[in-house]
Amino acid sequence: MISVIRYPAPCIGPLPGYLSSIAASLPLIRATALYLSAFTKSETSKMPSATGNKRVRGISVFRPFVFGSVAHPFDPQNKPEDCPPDHTHRWQIFVRGVNGEDISYWLKKVQFKLHETYAQNVRTIEQPPFEVSETGWGEFEIQLKLYFVPESNEKPQTLWHSLKLHPYGPDAEGMKERRETVVSQNYEEIIFNEPIEPFYEVLTGGPTGAQGKSKGKNTKQLGQSRTAHIPNSDTPGNPYSRVTENKELDRMAEATQTVEQMIKEEKDRLIEREKLLADLRESEGVPANTKRR
C-alpha cells in the first residue's frame, strides 16, 4: 500500500519550504493523502512467492521527488530552423530526485501523455533522466504515470502537471521582456506503507542496493543518502532546505502572534460593549437577566 503526499500548488522559481509536520496548516500549501491498495498481479505464474509477498508490518518508507516543467522562450531573431513557425518556446517536462538524487532504484519508468496534437503524444521513458523535451506555443495539462520497480508489487500512480510557458506574478512583464526561463515544479513525497520484504530491501539499500551490492555497502549508502532528509542549506538547484523551513516557521509564528493579538483586542472590545450594555440596562431599569423573546 502506498500513499502520495502532494503539495500541489505550482510556483515559479523556488518552492516554499518543506514543512512535513505542519503542511496541512500552511495557507499556501495543501497536503492531501491518497491511499491506494497494493497491486496484485492476476496471473498465477507471475505471482511472487509467499515469502517474497510478505509485508514489513508497521513500517512506512517515504521517498521525495520533484516533477514539473521548464520553458525557454525563443528569440524571434534566432529561432531553430526545424521548429514550426508558430512555436514560441522549448520546454521540458520531468520527474527528478530532490537535489539530484537517484530515484531509478524505486522508479522503473515514467509515462508522459502530452496534448493530442503532438505526434506520438504518449511517451514512455524507461531510464533516467525521466523527461521529455518538445516545442510549442500553448499551455496544457500533462498526465504523468509513475511505474515502480517489479520488486514493489505496487500499482502505478498518476499525476497531473499544468505546463507553464508564460511567467506570472509581480514581475511577469519584466521576465517576459528579458525572456527568462519559466520554472513550474511541485514537491511530492510518496510513502510506501508496509512494503513487501524484497522492495523494503531495495528502498533501504538506496541506489547502491538496487545494483545488488553487499549488505554492509547498502547500510553505508543509506547513511549517506539524502533522499529521506532535507539538506541544511539550499542551493541554486535545490530550494528545499532546513533554512527555508525555519523561515516558514518564523513566518507562521509571527502570523500566530498577530492573530492572538487581534483576538485579545476583540475580547477587550467585547468586554467594553457588555459593560456599556449593562450600564444602559441599569439606567433604564431593565433587569440584567432579562432575555429577548
Image (cartoon, helix red, strand yellow):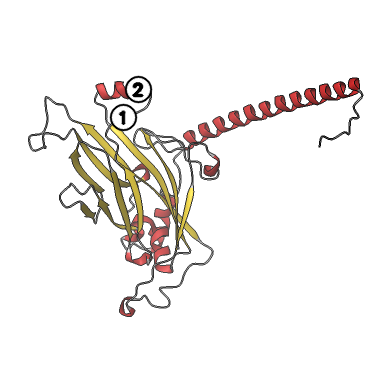
Residue 207, how many percent across, how many down?
34, 55
Q: Residues within 10 Å of mark 2 (few under 14, many from 20)?
A: few
Q: Looking at the image, which residue sits at the far front?
A: 293
Q: Which mark is residue 242?
A: none
Name the image quarter holding the C terminus.
top right
Residue 139 is left or right of residue 288, and the answer is: left
Whether residues under marks 1 and 2 lie with C-beta atoms below 8 angstroms apart, the answer is yes
Q: Which residue is mark 2?
A: 171
- Asked where in the image residue 259 lies, by quadrant, the reply is top right
Write the residue at 28% across / 42% down: 140
Write the residue at 42% across / 78% down: 50
Amino acid under disc 2: Asp
Q: Looking at the image, which residue sits at the far bottom?
A: 44
**Label 2's element?**
loop
- Asked where in the image residue 216 lies, by quadrant, the reply is bottom left
**Label 1's element?**
loop
Amino acid under disc 1: Pro
Q: Is residue 54 above or below residue 84?
A: below
Q: Is residue 224 above or below residue 250?
A: below
Write the residue at 38% across / 64% down: 154
Q: Which mark is residue 167?
A: 1
Name the image quarter holding the N terminus.
bottom left
Q: Is residue 19 above or below residue 201?
A: above
Frontmost residue, 168 versus 278: 278
- Is residue 105 in view from this perspective? no
Q: Residues within 10 Å of mark 1 (few under 14, many from 20)?
A: many
Residue 143 is left or right of residue 27, and the answer is: left
- Is residue 164 in view from this perspective? yes
